[in-house]
Image (cartoon, grey):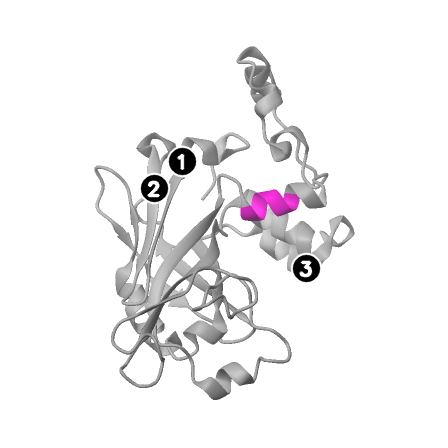
Amino acid sequence: MTRSISRRSFLAAVSTGSLARAASWELKAFPQWTAEDVDRLLTDSPWAKPATVPFELEPPPTRLLSDFSDIGLPGGVGWPGGGWPGGGRGVPTGPGSGSGQGGGWKVRTEAYLTVRWSSALPIRQAVALDRWGAGGLESPEALALLREEPKEYVIEAFGFPAIVFHRQVEQLKKELPAHATLLRKGHPPIRAASVEIPEYGQYLTVTFRFPRQAPIAAEDGSVEFIAATQQFDLRKKFKLPAMTYEGRLEL
């Protein structure tokens, strides 16, 4: 199960003076990553990027809001006047925005997400360590995840607040498959084959699956992930050469 950094990669890093700047997961063999290494891989790495997504939507019913008055609403979103714990910048817009009574008013706010290439090997390794620990990597579930040869590009967007999108889930399921794409310069777009949105928890994770029939190469330079709906426009660009792991592009 242990993997080591290749001698060629190590010598290349030394010769270019980049060893000090190398990421921790490049200098340590899996599964010797620390919890900090795993967290960084899953949230802020070449395969995982934070994203801020502005959107407008109608606020949930007053009764629904009151249901959360005792436990606090999820952070990562904004509401007018800073009324939601966790902050953000919510601004009422449209007719009747000052009172919120009738008039079809909407709220302009934002969600703080993480967009991640979950099919990439280093991400699957980090997930396995996070779920089962180093002592559990020989379990059938961990081995299935680690040895999988993904037949699709799988991208997940984490952090959509469920209380905000509670009435939009079915609409999102209809819109996103037709408006989720991977874009590269000089190539036709790769459109999503499917989109999954499980309806549980305070936050929604949206899983996008793209076919691999049109292989993406490091020479393409970058790839942009786009998921657009009437509610939001999510865009995140990834630099492909930086997504090379153990000598090959991992997506």
216 left or right of 185?
right
Task: Mark 3 vs mark 2: give the one in front.
Answer: 2
Dominant SS of magenta comes to helix
Q: Name the residue under label 3.
A: 140
Q: How crowded is mark 1: few (under 14 residues within 10 Å), some or many (20 or more)?
A: many
Image: 88 above or below 190: below
Number of residues whose C-alpha sits closer than 10 Å to that of mark 2, classed few (under 14), some (14–19) or many (20 or more): some
Task: Locate residue 198 relative to residue 107 in the image: left or right.
Answer: right
| Residue located beneath label 1 in the image | 240
Q: Up-down: is 27 above or below 163?
A: above
Residue furthest to the bottom: 63
- In space, the residues marked 2 and 1 are separated at their CA atoms by 7 Å
Residue 2, horizontal then vertical, whole percent: 70, 38
User: Looking at the image, which residue is at 51% across and 29% down?
Assistant: 247
Image quadrant in which you'd find residue 170: bottom left
Secondary structure, mark 1, is loop
The part of the chain drawn in magenta is: 38-43
Of 149 and 158, the residue lying toward us: 158
Asked whether the residues under the numbered discs 2 and 1 touch, taking CB atoms below 8 Å apart as contact, a structural biologist would say yes
Judging by the rendered image, the residue that carries numbered circle 2 is 223
Quarter placement of the C terminus: top left
Q: Could you tell me if residue 207 is visible in this image?
A: yes
Q: Distance between the residues labelled 3 and 1?
A: 31 Å
Mark 3 residue element: helix
Which residue type carries mark 3? Pro
From mark 3 to mark 2, how far is it between C-alphas? Answer: 33 Å
Q: Earlier in the sequence, mark 3 or mark 2?
A: 3
